[in-house]
Image (cartoon, rainbow, N blue to C red):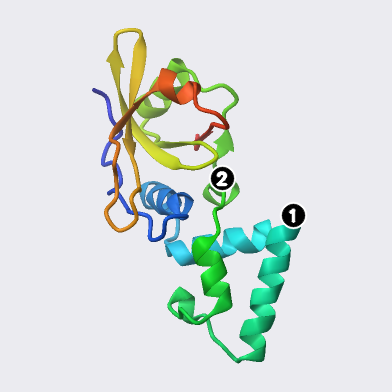
Amino acid sequence: MPTVNNPPALIAQATAAWCFAAVEQMVRAYYGLGPATQYEIARRNTAALATVDPQVQERWELAQVLDQSANINELGGANPNSNIVKLVSSQWNAFDHTTTGGHFVDGLTADIARREIDNNRVFVIGTHIHYYLVYGYTVNGKDLELHILDPWPAGQGGTRTRIGLREFLEMPARVAIIFG
């Protein structure tokens, strides 16, 4: 059962939409990148998404105008009256591989997964609805069982601890992001 040395601690996602932010926090902790709150990560990603998605752009601009006209401060994500905070707290986003120095793997294989873990590198897997951090594996017959940190459900962290590579590869809209 190979695992990376000193895997990061599991971090639960702070909202139902923020698995990407919790996983980014775990990646940041493991690779010694500067810390960021889940709100900071989600806000950065929402602002970036607003530059390419017209629907998010419209909601983003409206939230900014409403907060400015009412002189409402986000208070670092702590102000529930802020329209920006409300939007950011509910906005689903993708994992930001650029900020963390990662890159997509086209066609994750058992060899790639083993190489990353054997070289002491965690990596991220995800789908269009959820992200996980992979920190180890077990060979299970012809399948590789990935050891994962699952930030769901909000406030608790982790409903799954393992996922078969075959199962993952059968999921729709899947991605793998490595950092080496």
Label 1 crowd (10 A; few <14 / some 14-19 / many >=20): few
Label 2: which secondary element = helix
Q: In the displayed structure, would residue 148 be above or below residue 61?
A: above
Q: Residue 116: which quarter of the image?
A: top left
Label 1: which secondary element = loop
Residue at the spot of label 2:
97
Whether residue 52 is visible here, answered yes or no, is yes
Q: Residue at x 35, y 48 (%)?
A: 151
Q: Residue at x 33, y 54 (%)?
A: 12
Residue at the spot of label 1:
52
Q: In the displayed structure, would residue 60 be above or below residue 124?
A: below
Left or right for 63, reference 82 = right
Q: Amino acid at mark 2?
A: His
Quick one: quadrant of the N terminus? top left
Cα–Cα span, label 1 and label 2: 17 Å
Q: What is the residue that sits farthest to the left in this orientation?
A: 1
Left or right for 146, reference 103 = left
**Percent from the top left, x then y, of residue 180?**
50, 34
